Amino acid sequence: MNDLVTFNNLLWCGFVVVVLSLTVLVFRLFGREGLYALVVAGVIVANIQVTKTVVLFGMTATLGNAIYGCTFLATDILTELYGEREARRCVWLGFVAMGLTVVWMQFALRFVPGPEDFAHDALGTVFGVMPRVAAGSLVAYLVSQHHDIWAFTFWRHRTRGRWLWLRNNASTMVSQAIDSLLFCGIGLWGLFEPATWLEILGTTYLLKWIVAALDTPFMYLATRLRPAELAAEPPLKDGVAGL
């Protein structure tokens, strides 16, 4: 059992590094459009992964935290290099993508499976609870992401474009707390015993906080590895010039 827990811990840490690295790579290769695609995929996959509980660092936790954390890195990059409007556009794209996924999958579950079908029960297990989980996630996503963009911009102006690490962490860590409380309150309350629910709430925020802290060097890396579309453009006022 201890070996399995250790394996989970190491796998999760490695997964966080991979997810954050891929966020920077996608941005370097495809620019803002790449981040749009990453956020859309991240929101959908995170809401599927969150239905699975695991033991991480001796605590009960849900998956999806690493992938969901990369969406905050993506919107922070967009806010820093392209401005609030582009970041908010990305947030709404993720919202629409998740809403469409929920609607489409609910229709899919209503079809009577054929005699040779082997996937219906598995899809029902994953997507049967998705409407409620998705409702909690969508509310938490919209509120926390818009707060993150606002807070990132607020700290950028207050520090006159300096201290990228401060606005990256100050905005994301508070936004993740808002997200965790709203999501667990709407999406998971009643699905678990109260003690387990509280543990999931605590670990959900703790793991998101760790991802937010770890994404700081990747934020700096993203601003250095500017894609071709930004190569000849000056940085935004109060933006990356004052790192």
Image: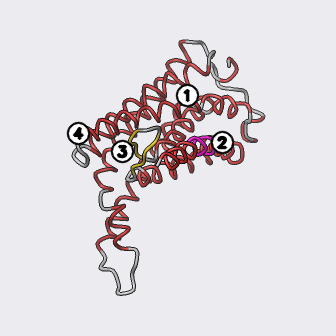
Q: CA distance from mark 2 to mark 3?
A: 24 Å
Q: Read off the residue under disc 1.
A: 213
Image position of 77 (left or right of 154): right
Q: Nearer the viewer, mark 4 or mark 2?
A: 4
**Which residue type carries mark 1?**
Ala
Q: Residue 193 lies in what quarter of the image?
A: top left
Q: CA distance from mark 2 to mark 1?
A: 14 Å
Q: Residue at x 34, y 50 (%)?
A: 134
The image shows residue 46 at horizontal and vertical percentages of 45, 49
The overriding secondary structure of the stretch rendered in magenta is helix
Magenta-colored stretch includes residue 14: yes
Q: CA distance from mark 4 to mark 2?
A: 36 Å
The image shows residue 160 at horizontal and vertical percentages of 60, 13
Q: Which mark is residue 21?
A: 2
The image shows residue 74 at horizontal and vertical percentages of 57, 38
Image position of 68 (left or right of 129): right
Name the foreground residue: 155 vs 54.
54
**Mark 1 nearby-residue class (10 Å; few <14, some 14–19, many ≥20):** some
Q: Read off the residue under disc 4.
A: 194
Proximity of marks 1 and 4: CB atoms separated by less than 8 Å: no
**Which residue type carries mark 3?**
Ser
Q: Read off the residue under disc 3.
A: 137
**Which residue type carries mark 4?**
Pro
Q: Nearer the viewer, mark 3 or mark 1?
A: 1
Q: Nearer the viewer, mark 1 or mark 4?
A: 4
| Relative height, residue 225 to residue 132 (above, below) | above
